[in-house]
Amino acid sequence: MTATDPQSAAVQLHDWFESILRLTEESLFSIAPEGPHRDAVVLDTLRRNARILSQAELDYEGKLYGPLCFFLAAACRRLGTSLAAGHWRAAMNNVIDLQNRLVSARDESHDVGLDIGSPAVVFKREFDEAIQQSGLAGGASYLGKDDRAVALGLAINWGMRLLIAYALECSRSDGSDRKDLAWVRSLVKPLLTASG
């Protein structure tokens, strides 16, 4: 598998996220024993990071990396779901496809005076709306319990895509060997170049 192999990148993203799940489970969520108290800790983490993310503007320094990771970990725990390599591959493909579409539509959007935004902006809008519909950010949701769970699932979907697009757009890179936002960027950027 080469550096531009989407399946290899998806497997690496899956392994990376599994380590984030393990870390949050063993440290953050484990302040309370399994059961209702731990469920409350997970829900508090989910709500806190949903609020942070929905109120934040996109930056190019990577400030949303932590809240996005904590949100995704807590949301997966809350729904009792996991993210397989196929989910990460679909997210990468979606980001790359949207990037290519927006590049080809840039002149036309300028000609009609519409700023569609970058992929991170587009995915952030969808993520924010899913957060709003889930009722996690403090606003009113008119959805029932099952539909709010669906909205949370959509927030996971958009959050994965936002994380990848955000990594590609952030200028922060420290060149370390840490698997952080700069690492996500270095993993996915060659795929963007190879597809364009």
Image: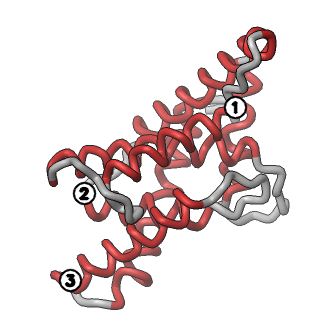
Residue 35 position (above or below residue 131): below
From mark 2 to mark 1, how far is it between C-alphas?
31 Å
From mark 2 to mark 3, how far is it between C-alphas?
15 Å
Label whose residue precedes the other's in the sequence (2 or 1): 2
Nearer to us: label 1 or label 3:
1
Q: Percent x, y for residue 42?
A: 32, 74
Quadrant of the image containing the N terminus: top right
What amino acid does circle 1 point to?
Gly
Label whose residue precedes the other's in the sequence (1 or 3): 3
Residue 1 position (above or below residue 166): above
Give me the residue at 80% from left, 65% from top: 176
Q: Percent x, y for residue 59?
A: 74, 54
From mark 1 to mark 3, how far is it between C-alphas?
43 Å
Label whose residue precedes the other's in the sequence (2 or 3): 3
Question: Dot 1: what SS?
Answer: loop
Answer whether labels 2 and 3 touch (C-beta < 8 Å).
no
Q: Percent x, y for residue 181?
A: 68, 56
Structural crowding at the residue carrying mark 2, measured as other residues with C-alpha within 10 Å and reported as few (<14), some (14–19) or many (≥20)? few
What amino acid does circle 2 point to?
Leu
Nearer to us: label 2 or label 1:
1
Structural crowding at the residue carrying mark 1, measured as other residues with C-alpha within 10 Å and reported as few (<14), some (14–19) or many (≥20)? few
Residue position for label 3: 34
What amino acid does circle 3 point to?
Glu
Residue position for label 1: 117
Structural crowding at the residue carrying mark 3, measured as other residues with C-alpha within 10 Å and reported as few (<14), some (14–19) or many (≥20)? few
Residue sitting nearer the eye, 164 or 82: 164
Question: Dot 3: what SS?
Answer: loop
Left/right placement of residue 20 relative to residue 81 reads right
Residue position for label 2: 79
Quadrant of the image containing the C terminus: top right
Give me the residue at 46% from left, 31% from top: 90
